[in-house]
């Protein structure tokens, strides 16, 4: 079974083999061309840096994701000069429905742009090339700091020669092995796991659906109409190793497809047209060091930028990439890398972390009746609906929704 087609423009970014690049001298090598790495490459290139954007896959390639771009992601795309193009190629939806384990449904007005990650990541890499970066295919297996004035040496899989750069960014997503060796992140278990497939069906649906299905708590399932007649259907589980009673996510997802009315009707009127793909998720910005000697920075999910509640990470990764690109371009311009030590602090400010609130929300979400209670109150309380909407945008403390205080205040507004 192959992935469904998409309206991807003909390849124009000329992704080259990294073997052609080893004799070049670079200001920055960006390892990983996901949203965070490409955003950093765009920012660095348009500030005049000589940038090599490196990814182990030939683009376009598939990526496990819900394919829904939030307001945070759209703001980052605006800064990258890409929002108009993304809106033109994507599908704009103005409503999100949230469904509790008992079937309580709340509709939240919010704008999302749906665009498959296969296309989005390709567009970001193209923008990096338009700004002057070189995009190459190859696998970095080691990065060595060659000394204060010698920069970094990047060893490549299958290549006898090495890349040399004044600085390096590691943006390898959920592939954390290299970042751990460089001590950018501590040894830690994944924060979550997600899986998704695509379903082709003629069922009309003009909203995004998030279901806090009983079998998947503490997590959720989703049905997103990513293109006319094509649906992204998946589920994610938060911090799966923290909770008693292991959940077999594939079996839980199969039960969701059978038991959730909309999912069942979707399959009755259509077919699954892609393999079920899974991915690990990493969150927890505060645990990452994120900077190593010589101006080596971690960017995006590899340092835990993904939301610990929603699992959304595209907008956060791009914001992180823009910040890293700006700081590193300034450091390269002055030759002074000492200011990069402030990068982790600025990341925490950018993240708007609510660690205690996330932990409390996770505990509430292990009890289906509490999730039912929150959504029942949200149907009656504009205040709680607003807070729930903000939480799904990662701009609100989860404790303002999933707590007795949040429920109590909902009776007054």
Image: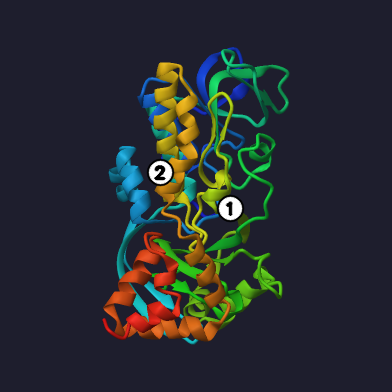
Considering the image in quadrants, where does the N terminus appear?
A: bottom right
- Where residue 124 appears, as percent x and y from the top left, is 42, 38
Write down the quadrant of residue 24 in the picture.
top right
Is residue 375 found left or right of 25 in the rendered image?
left
Rendered image: mark on residue 347: none
Q: Residue at x 66, y 66 (%)?
A: 242
Q: Is residue 261 above or below residue 97?
A: below
Compare residues 67 and 292 and report the one nearer the observer.
292
- Where residue 34 appears, as percent x and y from the top left, is 51, 41
Q: Earlier in the sequence, mark 1 or mark 2?
A: 1
- Between the C-alphas of marks 1 and 2, the distance is 16 Å
- Where residue 216 appears, as percent x and y from the top left, is 59, 74
- Where residue 62 appears, as percent x and y from the top left, is 55, 48
Query: How many numbered discs, if any?
Result: 2
Residue tagged 1: 282
Q: Residue at x 43, y 23 (%)?
A: 331
Compare residues 20 and 141 and report the one nearer the observer.
141
Compare residues 348 and 282 and report the one nearer the observer.
348
Q: Is residue 34 above or below residue 165?
A: below
Residue tagged 2: 319
Q: Dots 1 and 2: beta carbons under 8 Å?
A: no
Mark 2 secondary-structure assignment? helix
């Amino acid at each position: 079974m192959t992935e469904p087609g998409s309206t991807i423009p003909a390849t124009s970014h000329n992704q080259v083999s990294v073997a052609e690049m080893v004799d070049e001298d670079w200001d920055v090598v960006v390892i990983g061309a996901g949203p965070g790495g490409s955003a950093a490459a765009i920012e660095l290139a348009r500030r005049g840096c000589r940038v090599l954007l490196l990814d182990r896959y030939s683009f376009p390639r598939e990526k496990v994701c819900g394919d829904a771009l939030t307001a945070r992601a759209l703001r980052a795309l605006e800064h990258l000069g890409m929002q108009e193009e993304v809106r033109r190629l994507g599908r704009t939806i103005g409503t999100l429905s949230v469904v509790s384990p008992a079937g309580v449904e709340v509709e939240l007005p919010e704008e999302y742009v749906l665009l498959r990650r296969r296309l989005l990541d390709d567009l970001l890499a193209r923008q990096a090339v338009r700004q002057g970066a070189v995009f190459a295919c190859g696998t970095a297996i080691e990065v060595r700091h060659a000394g204060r004035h010698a920069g970094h040496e990047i060893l490549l899989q299958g290549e006898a020669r090495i890349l040399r750069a004044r600085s390096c960014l590691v943006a390898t997503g959920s592939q954390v092995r290299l970042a751990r060796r460089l001590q950018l992140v501590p040894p830690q278990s994944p924060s979550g796991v997600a899986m998704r497939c695509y379903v082709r069906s003629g069922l009309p649906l003009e909203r995004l659906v998030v279901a806090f299905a009983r079998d998947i708590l503490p997590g959720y399932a989703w049905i997103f109409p990513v293109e006319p007649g094509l649906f992204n259907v998946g589920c994610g589980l938060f911090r799966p190793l923290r909770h008693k009673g292991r959940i077999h996510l594939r079996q839980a997802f199969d039960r969701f497809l059978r038991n959730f009315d909309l999912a069942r009707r979707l399959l009755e009127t259509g077919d699954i047209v892609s393999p079920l793909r899974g991915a690990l998720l990493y969150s927890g910005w505060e645990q990452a060091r994120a900077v190593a000697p010589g101006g080596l920075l971690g960017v995006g999910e590899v340092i835990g930028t993904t939301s610990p509640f929603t699992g959304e990470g595209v907008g956060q990764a791009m914001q992180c990439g823009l910040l890293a690109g700006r700081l590193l371009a300034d450091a390269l311009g002055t030759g002074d890398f000492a200011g990069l030590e402030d990068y982790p602090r600025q990341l925490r400010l950018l993240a708007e972390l609510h660690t205690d609130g996330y932990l409390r929300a996770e505990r509430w979400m292990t009890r289906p009746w509490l999730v039912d209670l929150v959504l029942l109150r949200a149907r009656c309380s504009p205040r709680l609906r607003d807070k729930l909407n903000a939480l799904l945008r990662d701009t609100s403390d989860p404790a303002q929704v999933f707590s007795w205080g949040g429920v109590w205040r909902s009776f007054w507004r």
